[in-house]
Image: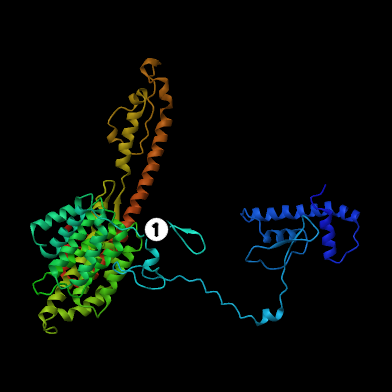
């Protein structure tokens, strides 16, 4: 029996204008209607599963109708629940009460507001601990806890569990420790107690809760105390101690520390007195920046790139002071010889052309400017000298390689291949590894044998006494000797190729470094030669 009643078929027939449908026809159509409904629903479930969903929607039904070549149902979805009404005279028949809509009312109705485009905006949650009163932030009375401590309910009846902001609580000991460190940094940075405090910062294991407070303290004091040289130096020493502490996870706070550190490196003026040795502060900060890049460069891939870009812009900006140029040069030099070779040396000649007038007494009457220019010149000389020294120090190791010897004259490079010596060593090792019967036939001064010499078997005595000859196993000895000779020859050829490749690379680097040394000699004169020890210098003399 079909689940579709014949009364349902009669009602549907009446809705499409068929009023004289017989009862037998309705009973016959009911099973067919059930079959078609089941077929449509099975196809709709397939569409739902292919859509990776667990809820059947009207779109799935429309897709099933399209698959079965049936015109889909057109219309629109309702935002609210459908209201069903019972049909009069039928106990199990319901229908949806559709209201008649006047087209005049629809046309004259005002247009709804256009939806806003999706966008991402940012706003301040709090500024120095104070929440700004803006529409994006909820007012304080909304997030205030209820007086009775219970869960409140909104107007729609849904319970809302309000989670208050978590307060960062420090122990009394940590608060006293922080106050003592900050007081020593600001007021007594030249005392022995401050040095003990730096050691404590670098070794104590329970200071991680204080890292955000130290970070904020350093940034605030650097921004306000650029005229206090001793304070700036003490702050940089605090940063150095925090970086040395293996128990502190300081990576999340690097973006707050780096601006303060770079400021102490390339700021126009550090300190307010003539006696303030801001050059030493810049040198210390350059080493600090290099240590940060070396330690965290693999975690933040853009750290060294952004830093070198900032330093290079500070160096190439003619509007910057010479003290800023000095800090940029020291920072680039501390990052390594490769950074100097790629970024500093290509701009060395035009920069020295502009720096030279500032160093001469005839063109620069200001003694302070000349002093700063000579400091910048010294920084450039040290950076270039360290770069050329690092470039040349690899040659003695390669040129004195134990497997090859190089004799250079004005015509060509003569190489003595290592095949002879290595073959001797390998031949002796092979004889040591041979069985005892074979070793008897090859006993003798092995080191004096030629490289390609093959060992001949010893012939038996003419008298026919087999006991005076070699054992029967010696008949296979020439094969082993020939195979060993071929192996030694192949290995010698491979070693010769490796030696040739090493020498060609050395020669290429030799030429490049020679051109670099000549260009630096033209710019700095004999001052650059003090950075080159005699073994490396002999390559170019």
Residue 485 horizontal side relative to residue 49, left or right: left
Q: Which residue is mark 1?
A: 163
Question: Which x, y percent locates residue 432?
Answer: 32, 29
Q: Local crowd at mark 1 within 10 Å, few (<14), some, or many (≥20)?
A: few
Name the residue at 37% across, 15% down. 467
- Coloring applied to the structure: rainbow
User: Which of the pair 485/123 is nearer the observer?
Assistant: 123
Q: In terms of image quadrants, where is residue 254?
A: bottom left
Q: Is residue 440 visible?
A: yes
Q: In terms of image quadrants, where is residue 319?
A: bottom left
User: Which of the pair 335/41 is nearer the observer?
Assistant: 41
Name the residue at 32% across, 61% down. 508
In the rendered view, would you say 91 is above or below 473?
below
Q: In terms of image quadrants, where is residue 150?
A: bottom left
Name the residue at 8% across, 59% down. 191
User: Which of the pair 313/412 is nearer the observer?
Assistant: 313
Name the residue at 43% across, 57% down. 151
Question: Which x, y percent locates residue 503?
Answer: 31, 54
In the rendered view, would you say 281 is above or below 427?
below
Q: How many marks overall?
A: 1
Q: Secondary structure at mark 1?
A: loop
Which quarter shows the C terminus?
bottom left
Question: Which x, y percent locates residue 325?
Answer: 22, 73
Question: Which x, y percent locates residue 247?
Answer: 25, 50
Q: Is residue 538 visible?
A: no
User: Which of the pair 363/504 is nearer the observer?
Assistant: 363
């Amino acid at each position: 029996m079909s689940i579709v009643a014949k009364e349902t078929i009669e009602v549907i027939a009446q809705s499409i204008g068929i009023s004289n449908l017989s009862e037998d026809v309705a009973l016959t159509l009911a099973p067919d209607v059930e079959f078609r409904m089941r077929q449509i629903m099975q196809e709709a479930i397939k569409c739902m599963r292919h859509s990776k969903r667990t809820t059947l929607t009207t779109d799935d039904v429309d897709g099933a109708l399209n698959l079965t070549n049936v015109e889909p149902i057109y219309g629109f979805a309702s935002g609210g629940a459908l209201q069903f009404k019972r049909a009069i005279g039928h106990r199990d028949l319901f229908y949806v009460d559709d209201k008649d809509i006047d087209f005049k009312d629809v046309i004259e109705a005002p247009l709804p507001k256009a939806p806003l485009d999706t966008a991402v905006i940012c706003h301040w949650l709090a500024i120095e601990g104070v929440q700004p009163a803006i529409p994006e932030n909820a007012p304080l009375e909304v997030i205030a806890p209820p007086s009775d401590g219970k869960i409140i309910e909104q107007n729609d009846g849904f319970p809302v569990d309000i989670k208050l902001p978590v307060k960062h609580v420090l122990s009394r000991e940590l608060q006293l420790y922080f106050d003592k460190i900050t007081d020593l940094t600001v007021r007594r940075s030249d005392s022995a107690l401050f040095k003990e405090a730096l050691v404590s910062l670098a070794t104590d294991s329970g200071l991680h809760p204080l890292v955000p407070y130290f970070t904020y303290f350093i940034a605030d004091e650097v921004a306000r105390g650029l005229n206090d040289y001793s304070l700036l130096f003490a702050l940089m020493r605090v940063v150095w101690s925090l970086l040395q502490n293996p128990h502190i996870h300081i990576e999340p706070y690097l973006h707050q520390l780096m601006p303060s550190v770079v400021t102490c490196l390339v700021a126009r003026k550090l300190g307010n007195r003539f006696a303030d040795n801001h050059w030493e502060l810049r040198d210390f900060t350059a080493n600090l920046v290099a240590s940060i890049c070396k330690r965290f460069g693999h975690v933040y891939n853009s750290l060294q790139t952004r830093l070198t870009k900032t330093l290079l812009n500070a160096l190439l900006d003619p509007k910057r002071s010479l003290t800023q140029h000095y800090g940029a040069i020291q920072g680039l030099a501390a990052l390594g010889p490769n950074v100097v070779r790629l970024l500093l040396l290509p701009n060395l000649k035009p920069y020295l052309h502009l720096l030279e007038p500032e160093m001469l007494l005839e063109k620069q009457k200001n003694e302070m400017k000349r002093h700063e220019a000579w400091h910048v010149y010294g920084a450039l000389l040290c950076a270039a000298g360290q770069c050329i020294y690092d470039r040349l120090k690899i040659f003695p190791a390669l040129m004195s390689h134990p497997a090859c010897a190089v004799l250079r004259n004005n015509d060509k490079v003569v190489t003595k291949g290592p095949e002879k010596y290595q073959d001797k060593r390998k031949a002796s090792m092979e004889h040591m590894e041979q069985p005892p019967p074979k070793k008897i036939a090859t006993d003798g001064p092995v080191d004096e044998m030629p490289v390609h010499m093959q060992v001949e078997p010893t012939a038996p005595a003419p008298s026919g006494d087999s006991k005076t000859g070699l054992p029967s196993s010696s008949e296979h000895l020439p094969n082993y000797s020939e195979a060993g000779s071929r192996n030694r020859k192949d290995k010698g050829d491979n070693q010769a190729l490796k030696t040739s490749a090493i020498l060609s690379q050395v020669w290429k680097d030799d030429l490049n470094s020679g051109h670099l040394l000549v260009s630096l000699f033209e710019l700095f004169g004999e001052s650059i030669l003090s950075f080159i020890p005699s073994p490396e210098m002999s390559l170019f003399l």
